[in-house]
Amino acid sequence: MQLPLGTPDFVGRSAQLAQLDGLLDGGPRRMSAVVICVLTGPSGIGKTALALHWAHRVAPRFADGVLYLDLRGSRPDDQVVAPSDALGSLIQALDVPGDIPCDPAARAGLYRSALAGRRMLIVLDDARDADQARPLLPGVAGCMVVVTSRDRLSCLVAAEAARPVVVDELGPAEAWNLLRSRLGERRLATEREALESIVAHCAGSPRALTAAAACAAIDPRLSLTELARQLR
């Protein structure tokens, strides 16, 4: 299994997790077509954390394993993974015997052939657009693909019947739970007003909340009141 380590203090996202579970348990469609899910939302909202958390949870249900690839779609152009290179990495991960062809179309055909008859979960993280992700989709039923992207990937939704799952801000209770898991109940209880200010200024962004919690954890002398003042 290629999955990176999931977030140990993952919180919330019950609605999105239920949507993903529903796609996995999708009845007849699950057996007759490739199931594709697009997790979409702005930077720092937790798309990758959600994808990894869910993938680790359901990995045992995929008898032939899990593939993971970071497509680096949100990085500068010279760092984005080209579809042909992505296909080469996935073919290597599938332990396909023989040489990997240079021609992109031949690589795509070999990749789809290697997946035929297998039951696998494929996580394509940080896709720039539909053109980057489309060549990496299996050709026959049995596999499920989860794509994360800042883009809505509307072309995949329209042409490949991908199911969009919107990842939005954490609610106040979820934000509190995240900070509680990072800082402990005792610290939150002693500076509750400051925590309320921190939660408000982080505006439900998991990236902002974890960064704030890291500042407080790294320097125990930094009071949460002072941290809230700095955020203001």
Image (spheres, rainbow, N blue to C red):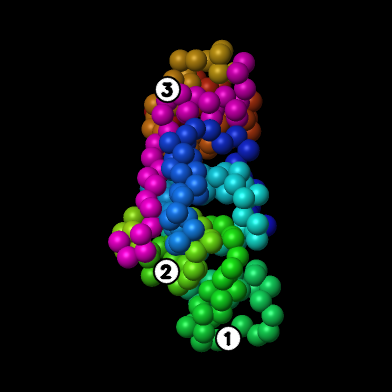
Q: Residue at x 37, y 45 (%)?
A: 166
Sequence order check, earlier mark of 3 and 1: 1
Which residue has dot 3 on it? 197
Asked which secondary structure carries label 2, the reply is: helix
Question: Is residue 46 shown to the viewer in this render?
Answer: no
Q: Is residue 182 magenta?
A: yes
Q: Amino acid at mark 2?
A: Arg
Location of residue 95 (image quadrant): bottom right
Residue 27 position, x and y percent, is 46, 50
Residue 205 position, x and y percent, is 43, 37
Q: Amino acid at mark 1?
A: Pro
Determine whether 143 is above or below 181 in the image.
Answer: below
Asked which secondary structure carries label 1, the reply is: loop
Please give the label number shown on residue 101: 1
Residue 155 position, x and y percent, is 31, 63
Q: Residue at x 34, y 55 (%)?
A: 152
Sequence order check, earlier mark of 2 and 3: 2
Which residue has dot 2 on it? 134
Q: Is residue 73 magenta?
A: no
**What span is colored magenta in the figure?**
158-186
Viewer-nearest residue: 182 or 52:
52
Q: Amino acid at mark 3?
A: Ser
Question: Is residue 97 shown to the viewer in this render?
Answer: yes
Viewer-nearest residue: 90 or 35:
35
- Judge left or right: residue 146 versus residue 52: left
